[in-house]
Structure formats: C-alpha cells, structure tokens
Image (cartoon, rainbow, N blue to C red):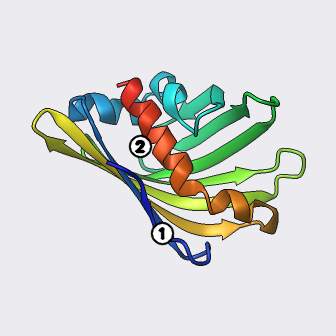
Amino acid sequence: MTAQAKIETMVGKEVVVSRLIDAPRARVFDAWIKPEKLAQWWGPDGFTNPRCEIDARPGGKIYIEMIRSSDGKMFPLDGEVEIVEAPSRIVFRARGYNPANDRTTIEDRVSATFEERNGKTLVTVHLYVLDVAPAFTEAANRMDIGWSQSLQRLERNS
C-alpha cells in the first residue's frame, strides 16, 4: 500500500498512512512498544535513533533522539502514551522540539491501529497535527512521506 495524505494547512489536520506488513500482528505491535525494536525503524530514511525510550502504558513517557545521518543533526522528540490496547491500537502525543531552547517544532497525536489480515498486519497511522513552528512547515508538509518511509522500515524490521 502507498501513503495517502491530505494536507491543506497543518494545524488541525490529519495525515493518514497505511501499510500491509508481512508479519503477525503481535510482532508488529511489539515493534511499537519495545524501545530496542522501535529504535530500529522510527523515522524516515537517513535517520537513526541512538536513544529511544517508551513506557507503553497510559501516562508513560516517550523519548526519542533522531539523528540525521547526512549531517549528524539531532531531532529530539518527547511525549506521553495515552492508550494501549495490545495488540490492536496505541495512541500517544509526540512533540518535536529544539534542544537549544526547548521550543516546540512539531506536535501531534498519533493513533496507530493494527489489523490482522491473513497472517499479515495492516498498520494504519492517523497523525493529528496540533502545532507547527513556522520554520518547520515544510517538514510538516512532508509527514506523509516520512511516515511512509517509517512504515517501510518497520516492515523490514518485523
């Protein structure tokens, strides 16, 4: 499946990306809630996650340091888990921010569902944009591409 996104203005909008992954639902869900597995696929191509933490329970914290391989620039993200319904759904808020001044760059609410499909898993990510700093509007407009690449990486690591 390919990414589908509808973006007019970012704040208040939703990006939806789906991918059918050739792996059992429980294994794909675990890749979202186990830090060592999440670190292997999170983010678009060209990024690594040397620090990845998730406490997969309501109120649990998320922290990921994404490093862009081309220049070593770090893009940290923090957030909080809202809902965990293993192995069918996880919902969390995530905030990218500038580590120099703690200002939010992009904030969103992510709802991921996992549907069993004949031994495969249909992953659907609904990303609700809550806030975008002006300097990050272009990046926000490409979130469908970034999430499509993330789900491709998830498939390779599931």
Q: Residue 104: give x, y in percent of width and height.
A: 75, 59
Q: Amino acid at mark 1?
A: Glu
Image position of 107 with respect to 156: above or below = below
> How many numbered dots are placed on residues in this image?
2
Q: Is residue 21 visible?
A: yes
Q: Which mark is residue 14?
A: 1
Looking at the rendered structure, the secondary structure element under dot 1 is strand
Who's the residue at 81% across and 50% down the image? 98
Q: Nearer the viewer, residue 48 or 1?
A: 1
Q: Is residue 33 visible?
A: no
Q: Which residue is mark 2?
A: 57
Apparent side of residue 17 relative to residue 43 in the rendered image (left or right): left
Work out which residue is located at the far left of the displayed protein and give it: 118
Who's the residue at 65% across and 61% down the image? 140
Q: Residue 16: give x, y in percent of width and height.
A: 41, 61
Classed neighbour count for the residue bearing mark 2: other residues with Cα under 10 Å, few (<14), some (14–19), many (≥20) = some
Work out which residue is located at the far right of the displayed protein and give it: 100
Looking at the rendered structure, the secondary structure element under dot 2 is loop
Tell me the mark number nearer the camera, choosing from 1 and 2. Answer: 1
Q: Nearer the viewer, residue 146 or 98?
A: 146
In which quadrant of the rendered view does residue 69 lie?
A: top right
Who's the residue at 59% across and 50% down the image? 79
Classed neighbour count for the residue bearing mark 1: other residues with Cα under 10 Å, few (<14), some (14–19), many (≥20) = many
